[in-house]
Image (tube, rainbow, N blue to C red):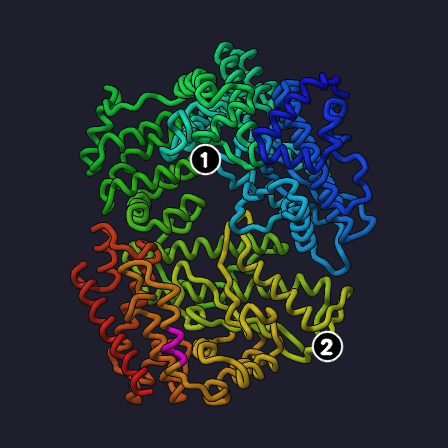
Amino acid sequence: MMATVDPETIATALVRACEESPFLRLAAQREPETAANAAALLADPLAAAFDGLNDLPVAARLRRARWRLALLAALADLSGAWPLEQVVGTLTTFADRALEIAIRAAIEERTPGADVAGFTAIALGKQGSGELNYSSDIDPILLFDPQTLPTRPREEPQEAAVRIGKRVVELLQARDGDGYVLRVDLRLRPSSEVTPIALPVEAAIGYYESAALPWERAAFIRARACAGDVALGERFLAAIAPFVWRRSLDFGAIAEIRGITARIRDHHAQGQAFGPGYDLKRGRGGIREIEFFAQIHQLIHGGRDPALRAPATLDALAALGAAGRIDADDARVLADAYRRLRTVEHRAQMIDDRQTHTLPAGDSLDRVARLDGLADGTALLADLRPHIEAVGRIYDALEPESSDRLPDAEAGLAERLAAAGFADGPSAVRRVAEWRSGGYPALRSAPARAALEDVLPGLIAALGEAPDPDAALLRLDRMLGKLPSAINFFRLIDARPQLARLLATVLALAPTLADALGRRVELLDRLIDASALEPVGDVAEIVAAMRAGRLDYEQRLDHVRRVVAETRFALGVQIVAGARDPLEVARGYSRLAEAAIETLAAAATEEFERAHGRVPDSELVILALGRLGGGALTHASDLDLVYLFTGDHAAESDGKRPLGAVHYYNRLAQRVTAALSVPTASGPLYPVDTRLRPSGNQGPLVVSLEGFRRYQTESAWTWEHMALTRARPVFGSREARAATQAIVDAVLNGARPERDIAADAAAMRAEMRAHKPAQGPLDAKLLDGGLVDLEFAVHVRQLVHRTGFSPDLAAAIRVLAGEGRVSDDLGVALELLTRLIVTLRLVAPDAQEPAPPTKALIARALGLADWDAVVAALDAVRQTVRAAWDEVQGDE
């Protein structure tokens, strides 16, 4: 219980709040009893917030409680009745309770009577440290245990967890007449751009043990299991503790420290200069610099001293000062500044309940000042300035002064780098000196630095021989910064000196491959022997490699991802090294993807059948379209797939948990898509695009073979028939593939609605041009006279004249040219445009004109003398394609 508060002090604060804050005035009007009795209610504000609301629906109860708590916390803050620690602690406790109530409600709605088990929320950021600000969002990570999560009958745990998570967010964040409860930001979860909002706990543990980034280590200083199955959350945090707290005196973490510091100081100019518009959180000398100052020292010393692992900033500063890890006076100055800046931040947020950290200008600044009890904005700025200047001075000590003067000890290194051909000598010296001093985690051990010294002369020479030495050095530096250990990498380079030259070329010229290496340096292993530069085998050979070993389903997913990543990397290197024609590489990419589909679709089907059995006389068929159908992928291609099934759509599976055929195959296709696209600990695989299915995104994911036939023969549009010209079954029995191909052949040969094909194609191309223009002067796909125009010209001829049908565009053009339907030159144009797009995806993915060394590589890949020849050839084939496209529209 909390101490009672003087009613007159609270009354005075209420008057000031209503005068200066529209939000608090509205809160007092909505909750008059809370406003009238605030002094007494502050004895137990959480109980007062929820009192008498149990009969309301969950969403309404949480929103009413939030209005009450917001008013009580503001009055306690404005009156000075509570110190900052009590204000932020109360706001955090309310957030924890609201999140707990939302999780319980979401589970109860779906599985009445089930225990709150198998689903947990890990609080990060200010919620994790018990320091939420007045109008803060929360940053939880939602985890689940597939073995204990309550699910509905025949429901997959992943599906259930995502639905629970979405309902939790809706209960807290959706706005209605009562406002909202909390803003919820789920982007701090692993790989948030591609992962579902709730993750299996074991997968999350694997990520933090093997693939997490340095900033995520700092984020978990403030992590806490706050709601749901707290025991599950605490087990997760215990498992990843070695990732956060390293026992060695981690001065190797200086690389992480510098990365964090760079992020703090890498702001726009706006919000940095002190005065109106200053950002209290992100500005120089602001709140975040205090937080990171503490966290940086915790990262260095907390592995050996558990007393320093305090999540809250003020507690961390006190512990660091007491232990002598930071100056005691600095600790006191930073703590005082933190309290003052956070308090003023609250004032700014109270005005309109906005998540702002900026000091406003003019009358609004005066309003913040008066809410704080000061005369005006000038007085407020004068009060804040000493704190901000002191924080800036202390934080500046973390960054060494920059200087272009090289120490004498580095003079020899500078000479070697200059002799090797590096244009920016001082920058190159600083980078290599950073490696030698153990500046990155991968180099913090003595054996790692010794291994570096062994290979450094040869590595510098190899980088110097690269077409662009400075670019190669920069990308190698980024790669080393991401590695957990560099010993094996250096030993591999030492054992295979020729590999260093190939690596330097890749780093200099192929940003796509360099980025892949930065994520998984073990991709280099594939380049150890000359077989890496040989063509990949046929689909059956690749499938055999993917199916090797006795692995469970999850292990199989990882294994296939490793095979694909290594082979795709090697195929890209073949182009960079000039060892293989890009057309041949494109076919290799396609065979690799087809093998992955064959392997993973079979594995997913086998896993699915364990629970649901088989649908009698029925099977899944996968139809490839687009570049995969045509057998010519690029390094970055999506997989355009259509899922079909044979047999009776009214049948039912024969397993322990039977499903109707339509439901069965839609669930199975979702599994296959996930197997092909969802990242695992071994990385991502392929993006899968299913929008070419019947009725597109409006239709079911899977249709029966008969439904597919009926749609294509009765309802499909011209663009769907154009896509069908490159259709090719890539999964299913021989009989099922033949049946599917027979439907495709019949449709293409005339069993389809009568359409004005040329007019439809012209309209569609115009719409594409308007909504998806070329990305740059080298966009061989979307430029006028590019691959899209070429494909349209060929597909219109095919459909109108019912001839030349082959998923292989080159083969189709040969037939059409032999019949006089198109010019022979169109085949030449296809080859050049395909070589160009396959190469550019590796070396100039932005389709902009590249640097001279990359221009030379592109010319070589296209079999041309130089860049001028490339430009001339591209212009010539674009004219050929434009003429063909114009002729098609005119003739038809």
Q: Amino acid at mark 2?
A: Ala
Q: Which residue is mark 1?
A: 485
Badge 2 vs badge 1, beta-carbon distance below 8 Å: no
User: Which corner quadrant holds the N terminus?
Assistant: top right
Looking at the rendering, the stretch of residues picked out in magenta corresponds to 760-765
* Vertical arrangement, residue 405 with respect to residue 200, above or below: above
Tell me the residue at 44%/45% (across/down): 519
Q: Please tell me whether mark 2 or mark 1 is closer to you in this view.
A: 2
Residue 285: x and y in percent read 43, 23
Residue 243: x and y in percent read 56, 33
Tell me the residue at 28%/42% (across/down): 471
Q: Amino acid at mark 1?
A: Ser
Tell me the residue at 31%/27% (across/down): 433
Q: Which mark is residue 651?
A: 2
Pointer 1 local density, CA inside 10 Å: few below 14, some 14–19, many at least 20: some
The answer to which of 379 and 563 lies nearer the viewer is: 379
Q: Is residue 341 left or right of residue 449?
A: right
**Is most of the magenta stretch helix, strand or loop?**
helix
Residue 353: x and y in percent read 58, 36
